[in-house]
Amino acid sequence: MFAISLPSFAVSGLIGGIIAILFGILILIFPRILNYLVGIALILFGIFGILGGSLLIGILSLIFGIVVMIFPRILNYLLGAYLIIVGLISIFASGFALIPLITGIIILVLGIIIMIFPAIINILIGIAFIIQGVVAIGHYFGWF
């Protein structure tokens, strides 16, 4: 595994958290720009994840972001699959930590709901980005 110093990880967590919250709010307010915001957000999360040391989720986010930008019509299925995978990774990587486990379960459930009911994707994706942002900022400030 790559050795990344704590300050660079913390900064990427804070910046990634702020970006996630902003994108979540924008998606809830302007649903027509969802495809592009999601694609850009996933690419940015991928870059910050790789820089922050989360290589697997970083690469996964980067790949899904590029695919969403190229094929926006299959966004709901791509995003549902992405959230399911990220949720499972969070659950299995959480160990005994309660907050990452709960976050992983929430993200997994959101992914499953999007796959079943794609019409509510705007609301769920906006909420998922806001949750990821709050968790990233919380980790940065040591709230949990």
Image: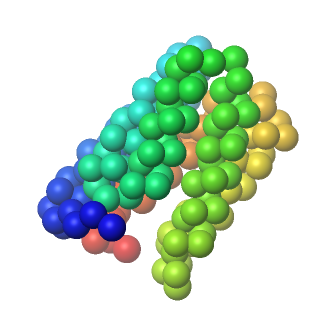
Residue sitting nearer the eye, 20 or 83: 83
- 31 lies above or below 64: above
Quadrant in the picture for residue 67: top right
**Residue 25 location, x and y as percent?**
47, 33
Answer left or right for 129 relative to 137. Answer: right
The image position of residue 59, as x and y in percent, is 45, 45
Residue at image location 55% in from the left, 65% down from the top: 90
**What quarter of the picture does the C terminus occupy?**
bottom left
For this orientation, the residue located farthest to the front is: 1
Can residue 34 be seen at all in this image of the molecule?
no
> Residue 107's image quarter?
bottom right
Is residue 22 visible to the viewer in this orientation of the structure? yes
Q: Is residue 31 left or right of residue 18?
A: right
Horizontal and vertical percent position of residue 135: 42, 59
- Find the residue positioned furthest to the bottom: 96
Q: In which quadrant of the rendered image does the N terminus lie?
A: bottom left
Residue beneath the point at 76% across and 49% down: 112
Q: Is residue 107 left or right of residue 141?
A: right
Q: Nearer the viewer, residue 105 or 143?
A: 105
Q: Position of residue 26 (x, y in %)?
A: 46, 27
Q: Quadrant of residue 138?
A: bottom left
